[in-house]
Every structure is written in structure tokens, then in C-alpha cells.
Image: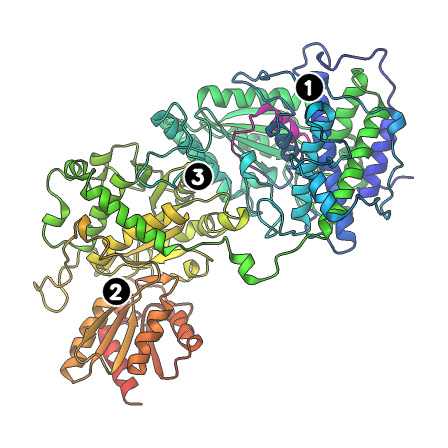
Amino acid sequence: MLSDVTTPQDLDDRFREALAGLAAAPRRRDPAERVHDGAPLTGAQLLDLFDAQVTSRQLDLAGRWLRSFGEGFYTIGSAGHEGNAAVAAALRPDDPALLHYRSGAFYCLRAAQAAGEVASPGPEGETDAPTPEAAPVSPEAEPARPEAEETPPAAGTPAEAEAGAEAGTGGEAADGTADDPAAGRDGAAGRADAYAGAARDVLRGMVASAREPIAGGRHKVFGRADLAIVPTTSTIASHLPRAVGAGLALERLRRRDPAGRRAGADPLGDVGQPPRSPWPPDAIVVCSFGDASVNHASATAAFNTAGWYDHTGLRIPVLFVCEDNGLGISVRSPKGWVEATLRSKPGIRYFSADGTDPVQAYEAAVEAAGWVRRHRRPAVLHLSTVRLMGHAGADAEAAYRSSGEIAADLDRDPLLATARLLVAAGVATADELLARYDERGWQVRRIAEEVLGEPKLASAAEVVAETAPRRPARVARAVVDAATRAGGPGAAARADVFGGRLPEAAGPLTLAQSINAALADGMLDHPGMVVFGEDVAARGGVYGVTKGLRDRYGAARVFDTLLDETSILGLGLGAGLAGLLPVPEIQYLAYLHNAEDQLRGEAATMRFFSSGAFRNPMVVRVPGLAYQEGFGGHFHNDNSLAVLRDVPGLVIAVPARPDDAAAMVRTCLASAAVDGSVCVLVEPIALYHTRDLYTEGDGEWLADYVGPGAWAAGHAPVGRARVYGVGSAEDVTIVTFGNGVPMSLRAAATLADEGIGSRVVDLRWIAPLPVADIVREASVTGRVLVVDETRRSGGVGEGVLAALVDGGFVGAARRVASVDSFVPLGPAAREVLVTEDAITQGARTLLAR
């Protein structure tokens, strides 16, 4: 008696029992024929889908087997969702895909496509070439069925297995067939080789093998650069805004470069060269997600952005694929809710199909993908699916589902549906399909045994190696090269961009003016650089920082967006992935908190999850911090940087002076282009238009914009501070940043009148902190006052003090910081923010110890 709980053994038994009850068709059908009149699939194509689905199913069973003895670390499977193989079959292997975590069959089919073993559709959905016939396995070849506790037979030494099972490595293929070039790599043997390679990828992820080809053992994800599959996190729907951004960037690049020239794996590697997409000009972006995800704010943002741009006439070729199994772990999607939600999205074409029916799913996927490719407009494909074996290995479905519901889903098993159709059409017999199923099961189990012995990440250095590589010499070289171009072959174009009045000849500039000039120079040197955000184009930004950029570079490179921070960052993430250098603006720091996960969960993790195979270079500009007199309250005077400091690998820059600001903009752009860095440039609003430092009219906070000839000398490396000496500069070291810099300099001047010499250290970079500079300058005086305009709890000062302790500083230290409070409106703000009086008093107290 079979149980009413879909355990791995139960699912396996039910499939076998159902296959055994299938009657053979009256006649055998040529695999080149359609499976039935009017069907879009031939028998050979359906066998391809079956093989991908079987591989995915066997991977799920292997995942549970590995977990049963503590060697598998991931059990969310694809069982019940194997219909997504039909979606892969309807796409081209160079269509970028951002996949839901139940996409095992899609991944396997895409691997076979990329290996040339499965045909890919043409522009209108027809296959480019007939799929090679897959020779049915004879019933006599069927091996004994493995039981859950059995150990598969040995497959030679680990080295032999490694050499033979990897797709394309020569020797013996993982399925045991000879990899004989004279015999070709087509037919069932070739496909088995491609599927074996895909299975090895997935199994390596399950056991956290350091040899896993995309994340290197850091996480189990679906991704591979040569398959155009971009790894995604497990954060629900957080990858959808990126998909929209990639689609928008693809279309813009297609219009700029219709020939679709490619620059290889590093599209921004040649700074100064025209941007080129890593994908063909007519590619479309596909992203998949579950039904519960339609309720997430990130999904809503992505749908809204795609529809908003479509409404304005801009094209975004993105295909959303909703795999609807009716459950979000244990929470049911109300009947009809998902369809009503997806149908109601303006500007997004709706397609639907039964995702457990391979013919219907393929037909709908071909129609949807073809529509998006032809019209370059967004669409959603809504696939009805089932979920088998629960959400993950520890899920007890009986707690929230009846046995009748579980049984009903089992009856809709997509793997069984494909098998039924193959047998009914006379393409294969039940025995032949069972033999394929068992052969693949033994193959997957054997590979699972092999990957168990592979090395794991064994040190912190290995884990973080690809999080955010820093190559300061190359970044500095990029700045020098930019200066050479701007002062040499690009001099005429630069003069034209600035209307004949170069910024270095304009006299002393404010912080805002310097940033504006540096952005203009950056756009000239980085043809793929795009500036966008709320009000940045026509208006030039709330504070005029981007004023004139659209007039100089056009609406395709400087454009306004809808008012949604998640979408703005998502556009940047996708644009960077597609080959552009995005510079999005978040209008105020307080607004960034609406979209933090796009930086933390998506931007900063891309290199981590892909071992550097993918990256999303980006420079995010954020007007922020406090001290705007008479304006705003905490919505416009936000002094919280803690959430940014906590993100591994993120570069956080806070320029205080105009000359530093220009240099730091150039550094951030170069770091993004060279290292793929994600940089956040927090620009102190209160200093944007500040002209004076000590007395009204002194102009001490203005600075000349230096020409290209001085860019190298004025380079501001990531993680290096700037030091000011006031008086003897021997008594106290004041470490600060942002608005704290001019306040500390004024306080230092007051202390100098009392005979106290100060060294004022402007951190400039909040992450990574300039630790060496902090420790060195603190050691000179033996007394450190940390001036932190962010809050006392979670503020930057905590990191500075910790760096001093870690660096062995043994002198006296004290901190002045803002109160743990939001910034109130009006004069009350002075009661919670750091003041000059607090700085001078703090220094005196420190010296009195």
C-alpha cells in the first residue's frame, strides 16, 4: 500500500506503478513525426523533455538521499515543476535566464541545448535544426532498481570518474558510453553526456563542493555563464527588478549596436570602448518565480516598472514565468488570485498553460517567447504546476494538506504526463521509458557518490575571495588612462561637451558643481555609462547635481525614472549585468531603506554567488546625511549608514570637499569598470552648495576642478584617508567624515588659538575604512577623538574605535556622536546632532585625562 505522503520512495514507487499500467500504442511512431495531429512537438523533442525531466527528478531524489546521512545541504527540489523544461525548449540557449529554485529541468534542458544536443527555436518558434533521434533503451538493458539504502557500484577511481563524467572532457562519459569523436556527440549518448554534466553541477551545489562551477560551494544556485543562466538568491522575487533592468539595457544596446558585437565575458574590460552586451541583440530575458512571489513588493515593483515603461513607449523584452503550485510553503494562494493579479498588470501580455502538460506548456512558451522577441515587450507566462515532496526535506505536508490534495497533485505529476504521452503516441514503450529512468537514476547516484569526496571551502579567504576583489593598481591605471584620453585624442570632444568652457577654467567650484563636472567627464570616458533616477534628467536633480547632463549626452543616457527605489536599483543591476555602467541616483538616503535588499541581497552577492563569472558594476549616488538648515526632518536629513556598512564588499564613499568629490567619483567609476565594484557615493546635502569654512565670504570650502593632467596626482584610492594639520598637529587626532570635516576643522582652529595642535583625518571611505591611515595618525598624537555625525548606536564611530583596538592602539580615545534619534524638523535638530561645541569640548576632555 502506497502512502499519502510524497516521500522520495513513495514518489518513485508511484511513478513505476503508473508506468507499468500503461498499454503500448497500436503502432510505433517515427520520433521525427509529431506526437499527434496539431501538436507542436515531435516524438524526439518530447523525449528530450522527458530526459531533462527525469534528470531533474533523479536529482531531487539524490538530494534527499544525501541529506539522509548528513552530506547534502539543500533539499528544495523541482519535483512537480519539471514542466519548466518546456520553457527552456522554447527559448534559445543565449537568452539570459534568472531562475526560480525549482528550475532543475529547465537547467538540464538548457545544458543540452548549449551542448548542441537539443535543437533551439528560431525567431518564430520553429527549431533551427531537427533534433537527433534519441535511440530508445531496450528493455533488456534495464538494470536492477536501486533501493534507497543501497550504495551504487563504484565507477573507477575518483580521478577516473572526474575525467570521464565531465561533459566535454574526453575519456568515458558519465553514462558509461565511449566518448568516441568518430561516433559523434549526437543521439542519446550525447544527450546523456550533457545531462550528466548538468547533474554534476547541481549535485556539487547540494554538497557544497568547492568545484561547483558557479558559486564554488558558497550556495546551491542554478547558474552558469556559458548557459546564460544568472544565479539568483533565495530572497523571494528579488531578482525580478534586475530582470527588468537587463531587458531595458538589452533593448537600448540593441538600438545602439544592432550588429550585436560582443566583448566577451568582461563587457566593461576595455574602458573607453563602446558598451557591448554579452548576449545577442534579439535576445530576451526570462525570469521565473513562484505563485506566492506575486504578492512580494519586489515583484510588484518589477511588474509595475515593466508596464510603466511599456506605457511610455519604451520596450523591455522580458518574459516573466510564474510557476503556480498554489502554495507558498504552507500558505495557500487563494483560488483565482494569481491569475487575476497577473492578468491585471497593465502593459504586460498574459499567457497561460497547464505546466504539467508538456505539449500545452511548450506551445504556450513558444507563443509567449516569440511574442516578446518580436515585439520587444514584456509578457507573463502563467503555468499551473504541482509541488511534490513538499517544500523541502523537513516539510511535513500532512500538517497543512489533506491526503486527498496530495494524491490529486500526484495524479498531475508532469513526469508521468510526459511518459503517458510518449507511450500513447507510440514513440516509446513503458519499459523503454522505465529503463531510461533507471539508467539516469544510477548515473545521478554514481555522480553523487563521486562529488561527496570533493573538497569544500576550507578557509575564510577562500569563501570571500570573489566577494569584492580590489585591484588598486589597475584602478589607478584606469584613472591615468582616462586622463590620457581626455587630454589627448578626446580633448576636442571634451571641449565640445563642456561648450568650450572647461570646468578647470571655471574657477573654484562647490561640491555639487565638482560632482557634476566629474560625472560629465565620466560619461565621456565611459560610453556605457548611464545616469538615471527620480528627476535627474529634465530638472537636473533636486539639488542641480546632474544639471545639463541630459543636454550634453541625450535622453538615452540620462533619463528620469518612475518614483520607486527598488526599481531604480533593479534597473542598475540589470544594466550592469548587460554591459552598461549604471549610475543611478536615490533621491534621499531615507528613501534607500525602501530598497536595501537590492543592494545587499542582489548587488553585493552577485560575484559571491557566481565566483566572479557575473558582476553588476554600479555607482549609486545618494544625497544624504543631515545639517540642512530649516528643511526636511528625518525624511531629508537621514544620518543612518549602518545598513550599508554591514554589506560585505560594498564600497561606501562620503566626499566632503569639492576636490575630493571629483577624484572620488573618478575612482568609483574606475573601480566599477575594472573590478565590477558596487559603490555607494553618499553626498552630504548640507555641503553641496557650501562656499565658506571659517567666516562668511572666505570661500575656503570651494576648490578648483583640476584638468586631466592632474587627475593622476589627485587620485583618491579606495580606502585611503585625507589628513589636515592644524597648528602644531601634535596634540590630538580627530577622525571624522562628511559634515564632520568642516566642523572639526573649525573646532581645530578654535583649539589652535588655545595652543592645541590637531590632526584632522577625513576618512572619505566608510567601507572599506582606511584602517592603516587611522592607526598611523592616531599613533602620532596618542589621543584620538572620533567625530561621528551618524548615530551613537550602529554608527561609523564604532567601526573606527574597533579598528584602533584591532590595530594595537594603546592611547586615549573618546567619541562624540549624534544621539540615537531620528532627525527632527527645525532647530530641534541641533539637540540630537553633533555640534562644533561638542567637538571642542570632547577634545579638551580628552587632553585633560
Task: Name which of mark 1 and mark 2 comes first in the sequence.
Answer: 1
Which mark is nearer the camera, 1 or 2?
1
| Residue annotated with mark 3 | 574
Q: Which residues are magenta?
A: 81-98
Q: Nearer the viewer, residue 318 or 605?
A: 605
Labels 3 and 1: the sequence-earlier one: 1
Is 431 displayed left or right of 231 in the figure? right
Q: Nearer the viewer, residue 261 or 539?
A: 261
In the figure, residue 293 lies in which quadrant?
A: top right
- Residue 739 is labelled as 2
Look at discs 3 and 2 and give the one toward the viewer.
3
Above or below, comparing residue 273 to residue 771 in the picture: above
Instruction: Tell me the mark number nearer the camera, choosing from 3 and 1.
Output: 1
| Amino acid type, callout 3 | Gly
Kindly identify the amino acid type of the residue bearing the numbered disc 1.
Pro
Q: Dot 3: within a 10 Å radius of its alpha carbon, few (fewer than 14), some, or many (20 or more) residues?
A: many
Q: Secondary structure at mark 2?
A: loop
Residue at position x 35%, y 55% from top?
473
Query: Residue 773: x, y in percent?
Result: 33, 70
Location of residue 752 in the rendering, given as x and y in whole percent from the top left corner:
16, 80
Where residue 366 appears, x then y in whole percent?
58, 21
